[in-house]
Image (spheres, rainbow, N blue to C red):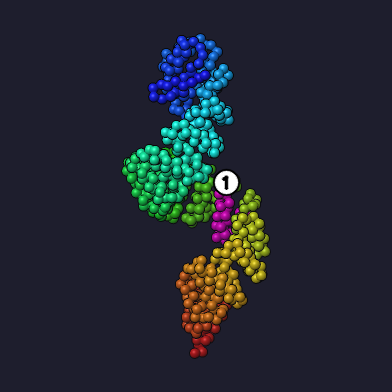
Amino acid sequence: MVKRLVVGRKTRRMQAIYSTGKPKTILLWAGILLLLGLAGCASKAHMGTPPLPAPPEEVVQKAKDAPKVENPYYNFLQGYMDGLEGETDAAIEAYRKAIAQDPSSSYLHLCLARQYLKTNQPQEALAEAQAVVSLDPNDVEGYSLLAGIYSASSQIEEAIQAYERVLELDPEREKTRLFLSTLHATSGDYDKAVEILQEMIERKPESFIGYYYLGRLYAKQEQFAKAEESLKKALELSTSSEVVLLDLARIYEMQEREEDAIEIYQKILEEDPGNLLVRDRLGQVYIGQKKLDEALTHLKALGQMAGSDAIQVHLKIGLVYFEQERFDLAIQEFLIVLAAEPDAHRVGYFLGSAYAENGEFEAALATFSRIPPEAEPYVDACLYWAFLLEEEKRLEEAVAVIEEALEHQPDDDRLWGFLAALYEHAEDYEEAIRCAQKALDKSETPAKHYFTLGVLYDKQGDLTRSVESMRLVISLEPENAEALNYLGYTYADKGIHLDEAEGLVRKALLIRPEDGYIVDSLGWVYFKQGRYEKALRELERAEGLIPDDPVILEHLGDVYQKVGTYEKALKTYKRAMEKAKDQDQAKIIEKIQEIEKLLSNR
């Protein structure tokens, strides 16, 4: 049976000595294999032994010149030599022949398993690794290889059991403890994962790996204080470890301790000014802090060093310029990206948006029109395209854009919802309601479409359906301030259910206390209740929050009239008149005339 030969201080798993045969023959093969210095099976398997050094050339030649006798010695050596030369198929064949002649050799099965792994045959490798531990229950390398195969195939429990057996046989294997901890974490047993790493540190207090991975594990559980403590311990053991510094900085970022993260990144750059990852992270942190000039400094430096990755840097710089509203510079950066990557359609969307914000509407429309239906941002582009057309009062063109988009994306509720808005703009409420109902049918978030329907029914004069729709919104989203306010204001404006209206608006105001429109609604509820002093206080606050809204100004004028401050009422009505739409001016003119008449009769 093929066994081990102890060479120096380590057991090397490459010696083939038989219990039968002539002593001279045994010593000859033992000598050859010892000279070969075999420490594995010609390759490093998953989590296995290190690769082998090439044997002395004269020994290889002697082996090649040896008589080709069909026996496990020869086939084993042939498999080993084939493995060294990268001839894995030949190595597999040789090892299989050797196993056929000596099926009880666990070591030959181990060698074959490793060759199977090299040729991406995991099932065959698994069968051979299982044979190894079956033949030799104390084979550490066999269990280690078996655990690696189980782990790679996501058989977590089996991998854990195999690694635990490795540690029973050889408790000093630090990396095995690390692998075992990782598997427990993967299976969700973080307490066990932490326990294993802590045991590693207890056995070896100077274990850099133990502290480092313990810190990462705590970070994954969002136990940031413990993570920071462990990583700082790792830094004590390796003061300049960049990988630890980077993880520590990321932990600070996750805690929104941006200044601490920046300090670490700058420390790394002092030692390594060309560190692309750190330049990128610094840029991102500064963007998050809205320190866009500092972000640009690092991103531009990154662009000069990034080589093949420079295109992505141009994209980030373009987005920073966009955020700074320096749209002309953003356009230049996006054009650079698209010149290199014409199919980067999301960048095309950014470019169209930059043109639109820069006032270059035709360029924006042309850019959006070039984004094909199969592209990820196609719907976003069509919505923005139609929005721009609507802004330019080209309503029919906007409808045509959305209808064409629906031919390609008929189940997109956003398209149906925007089409409903376009028909609402055209005051075609019947068609708008049809589209809003389509959007509702297609949507997984129906509340927003019920809200649209409520508004449309209201404009159509169908109060019952409008109220039903708003109540549905509130049942789905009890904290929906818009729906609460809309229903409360509707009741107040109609002069009905005023106590319920007050409760609805007050709840909306708790959610959005500084919303001028909701403050106006509460003032209008008080007005309808005849509580004019309270109405005056709320309506003056609403006007302070939104000074130029014609409805708020008209409401304020109404309450001034009720409390008898006619001069203020007249002044406020005139301001409302200046801001009101043409169709709303007639009733304000009547109120102005009434006040002027009252003042003239004094």
Q: Which sits in the foreground, 255 or 485?
A: 255
Q: Amino acid at mark 1?
A: Ala
Our reading of the magenta stretch's main secondary structure is: helix
- Please say whether residue 69 is visible from this viewpoint: yes
Asked if the magenta segment contains residue 385, the reply would be yes
* Residue 352 rendering spot, x and y as whole percentages: 51, 51
* Residue 242 rendering spot, x and y as whole percentages: 37, 41
Vertical relation: 322 (above or below) 69: below
- Please say whether residue 424 is visible from this viewpoint: no
Vertical relation: 273 (above or below) 432: above
Q: Which sits in the foreground, 28 or 595?
A: 28
* Residue 435 rendering spot, x and y as whole percentages: 65, 59
* Residue 419 rendering spot, x and y as whole percentages: 62, 58
Vertical relation: 550 (above or below) 107: below
In terms of secondary structure, where does tag 1 sit? loop
In this rendering, the count of numbered labels is 1
Asked if the magenta segment contains residue 572, the reply would be no
> Which stretch did the figure color magenta?
375-404
**In the image, what residue occupies the spot 55% across and 57% down?**
388
**In the image, what residue occupies the spot 46% across and 31% down?**
169
**In the image, what residue occupies the spot 44% across and 23% down?**
12
Q: Which sits in the foreground, 137 or 52?
A: 137
Compared across the picture, whether 494 is left or right of 223 comes to right
Vertical relation: 397 (above or below) 109: below
Q: Which residue is mark 1?
A: 375
Circle 1 crowding by C-alpha within 10 Å: few under 14, some 14–19, many from 20:
few
**In the image, what residue occupies the spot 47% across and 75% down?**
540
Residue that extends furthest to the left in the rendered view of this protein? 270
